[in-house]
Image (cartoon, helix red, strand yellow):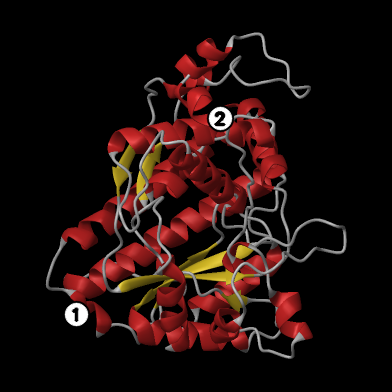
Amino acid sequence: EGMKAACEGRVVEVTIRGDNDFYSQQDTLKQQGLELSTSALASLPPFGPPTKHADGGIAKTGLGSSAALVTSLVGGLLTYFDMIKLEKGAVLTPEQARQVHNVAQACHCYAQGKIGSGFDVSSAVYGSQRYIRFSPTYLKGNLPESDGSCDKTGSEVSSAILGKWDNSVSPFSMPSYLHVVLGDVCGGSNTPSMVSKVLKWKKEGGQEALDLWNELGNANLSTFELLSSLAQQSGHEEDALSLASEVFEHAEEKELSGSGMKKDLLDLAQRFSKSRRLLRDVGIAADVPIEPQEQCALLDYSMKVPGVVAAGVPGAGGYDAIFAICIGDDAVKRLKQAWSEWEHNTVCALPCLSRDCGLCEDSSAYAEKAEKASTF
């Protein structure tokens, strides 16, 4: 009712623009004779037009662009109609964040045609986090059908969507000496289709599928717990940076002994390696290319770079992107140089930075990103 009153006599023109990091710019760089590098990407005008694959699909980088755009649109509309107050440089209050989160989840699920985990929308709202999803019952029966019809009244839908859900978000920060680097591989993956196939395998695969799924979940939780523990420790940055020349390839085959930061970082590399192996096993069992051979080769190549403690495929996996975690800036530079020399010339390190905060009004992000990109 509040939004209805706020809309009286007002006309809204909506323009949605997507950050270059969400859409592959490899074709643009090649057309302009530029190398596939972070600095070249950062030199392009912001919000460039997305390019397309040969099959007509948008060339995305696989970083949750649809969720980010839906969330920013919802946040912008709720701000415009005075439902929330999104101030420059300030994050949302818990109640405002909850409202944006719930509405954005509903819109995104409707647009995707299914109720997914919601992690990508939650990340866009809250930033870095440990996430426990909401129960699908909050949205089942409260979203319009494909023809736009809905059996519920507007007030019933509003009550269901704006009510308190059972999702859980715990803030999370990386240790200061570990940097996340994302690479655009520009392969293209249909995330909803891939996720549906994995869920079908999980449902129909019996105890064997359930055991593998639970083992992967426990491995991911173990990695999260170690990262959280390292982030809470202070005074160890110098010790960590002194290990930036170490190679963590084949970490699971190495003996975990000794003490101190060297043991901690090897332990972290082992846990990431285990999660990657189990995720690959899930893909094989479900017949889904979560870590295709092309990505596997690139990830193995990345792990040979000194100072890289982890490499993998983000999100649902596929051909879109890869990530790596490096010890300090020097390791980041080495990794980006290695990617530029990759024999297949298909990977471009993105300028985007890791940030803990979620949705906010912040025009300084581009300046910060460009300045950081110019140093690598």
Q: Position of residue 69 (x, y in %)?
A: 58, 49
Q: Is residue 126 left or right of residue 286?
A: left
Callout 1: 10 Å neighbours few (<14), some, many (20+)?
A: few
Q: How many marks?
A: 2
The residue under label 2 is 106
Q: Amino acid at mark 1?
A: Asp
Q: Work out whether residue 353 can be spotted.
A: no
Residue at horizontal 73 percent and vertical 62 percent from the top: 59
Tell us which disc is closer to us: 2 or 1.
2
Position of 207 relative to 72 (above/below): above
Taking depth in this image into account, of 257 and 62 the one nearest to the observer is: 62
Residue at horizontal 34 percent and vertical 39 percent from the top: 169
Q: Position of residue 221 (x, y in %)?
A: 36, 46
Q: Position of residue 27 (x, y in %)?
A: 76, 76
Position of 310 relative to 348 (above/below): above
Figure quadrant of residue 198? top right
**What secondary structure is marked by label 2?**
helix
Position of 127 relative to 180 (above/below): above
Residue at horizontal 19 percent and vertical 81 percent from the top: 238
Q: Position of residue 145 (x, y in %)?
A: 72, 20
Q: Amino acid at mark 2?
A: Ala
Q: Work out whether residue 167 can be spotted.
A: yes
Callout 2: 10 Å neighbours few (<14), some, many (20+)?
A: many
Taking depth in this image into account, of 238 and 351 the one nearest to the observer is: 351
The residue under label 1 is 239
Taking depth in this image into account, of 352 and 49 the one nearest to the observer is: 49
